[in-house]
Image (spheres, rainbow, N blue to C red):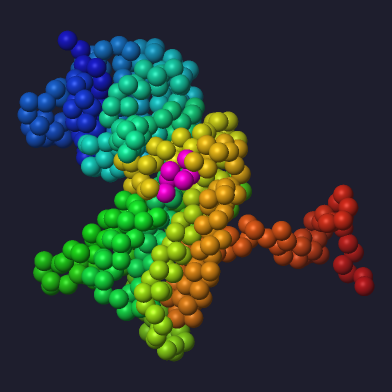
Amino acid sequence: SKQQIGVVGMAVMGKNLALNIESRGYSVSVFNRSASRTEEAIAENPGKKLVPTYTIEEFVDSLETPRKIMLMVQAGAATDATIQSLLPHLDKGDILIDGGNTFFRDTMRRNEELANSGINFIGTGVSGGEEGALKGPAIMPGGQKEAYDLVAPIFEQIAAKAEDGEACVTYIGPNGAGHYVKMAHNGIEYGDMQLIAESYDLMSRLLGLSVDEMAEIFNEWNQGELDSYLIEITADILTHKDDETGKPLVDVILDAAGNKGTGKWTSQSALDLGVPLPLITESVFARYISAMKEERVEASAKIKGLDVTPFDGDKKELVEKIREALYFSKIMSYAQGFAQLRIASEEYGWDLNYGEIAKIFRAGCIIRAKFLQKITDAYAENPELKNLLLDDYFNEITQKYQKSVREVVALAVQAGVPVPTFSSAIAYYDSYRSADLPANIIQAQRDYFGAHTFKRKDKEGTFHHDWYTK
Ligand code: NDP
């Protein structure tokens, strides 16, 4: 008999996803370019309804029609190569699902190319890492709606479940919409991580708190507004000790962060769309500057900040202000990220449902957090909301917490502790709520040196001033 679904790619994500699908009662054919990974996956999981196949023909032939094939291979050229190897063996109406971290424009291209040969193509974001893939990821599918409907029952079963029992999967929109939302999710993840790192740095450098004390604080934060996976794992990370030295593990881990490019794509897309996305972009740059470890060490010997007297105020009070600053800044980041989704949706004709997107982020994925419910509520109240900051809840809470972020940023700047995302958060807030910005000067300069013309506040039309005669 034939299997109900196939998974290509038996590296960590594909293997775990196949096991997740199998655990819901489906029979799954698996295939991997190199046979060894397939053999390994089968050997590790005796008694499971995973059916190994060792040629593309055998794999395709083992599946019920219309075939449902999930690709979990390296994004980019590997995904194209895999699709090309499958294509000659597929029939019209078959459904190819790419679950890799694919660039959304590649998904748009593949969706169009494959549609010409009658093959349905779903590009889907899958978030939650290895454990999510196995136990329940957040899933962001985009592509032909009719094709998605055929795989929806499987996706709903394998997806993470939110507290109210709802599956963390929803049809996102046509062609590249799912992968775009996954990309934006990852960008937001970069921002959240950098904000937490800055909070840690402030508590460490400004307040001199120990790693143990900080673990306790993150733990407390996780009980309130900041309740989220990334805060939770940070609290846990801080409790781990190095086996060799007995020191806190974070103290021996090198301060140079890598990346796989999804944060960069988010910022690049924002630049292309003309959407301000300063917080996420700062967090991408923060990773880049972190990676310049040697250069920073050299510079630190030569370039000195100010000598400042150590903080001698109430530490507990300042910790609470840092918490408020973190929540404030997180809101700025999500406001920017969701504003980007809105502009992208208009540009690419995706008709995104922002409340539903926030909903599926509530469990399974890396940015899962209690606070996402507030975003869902905001869009339920007003689906056309231009910016989250205009929603009553977000408006009130950010007005309330702005004092803390201003104080924290001022202290950090004085003490020479870099807070690129905290400071960009307050700058965005102040820019967004400014009826007047100094761009009048920019307009005048552009007209002055390049005759680019300008508009006036008091009347319609385009004007040019003869700047060279007084
Ligand atoms: P990798 O990204 O490391 O990819 C390895 C897989 O790709 C192997 O099956 C490998 O086959 C296959 N592959 C590589 N090159 C080719 C090629 N030229 N032709 C055919 N197959 C090829 O695996 P992961 O499991 O980490 O990730 C799979 C996908 O899921 C990626 O797109 C990743 O970005 C995405 N993802 C990963 C997450 C994670 O936490 N790791 C989270 C969410 C998404 P072979 O064994 O023959 O080399």
| Residue plotted at (17% across, 10% down) | 1
Say whether residue 228 is visible: yes
Tell me the chief SS of the magenta region: helix
Would residue 273 be counted in the magenta stretch? no
Residue 346: give x, y in percent of width and height.
60, 35
| Residue plotted at (49% across, 27% down) | 174
447 horizontally vs 134: left or right:
right
Report the number of numbered marks. Answer: 0
Query: Which residue is the extreme one toward the right?
Result: 470
Foreground residue among 190 and 374: 374
60 horizontally vs 303: left or right:
left
Foreground residue among 246 and 206: 206
Residue 52: give x, y in percent of width and height.
15, 24
Q: Is residue 3 above or below residue 461?
A: above
Say whether residue 81 is visible: no
341 horizontally vs 194: left or right:
right
**Quadrant, the C terminus:** bottom right
| Residue plotted at (44% across, 59% down) | 327
Q: Is residue 383 above or below residue 312?
A: above
Would residue 374 be counted in the magenta stretch? yes
Residue 333: give x, y in percent of width and height.
49, 54
| Residue plotted at (7% across, 29% down) | 46
In the image, which residues are magenta?
371-376
Q: Is residue 303 above or below residue 373?
A: below
Residue 152: give x, y in percent of width and height.
36, 22
Foreground residue among 161 and 467: 161
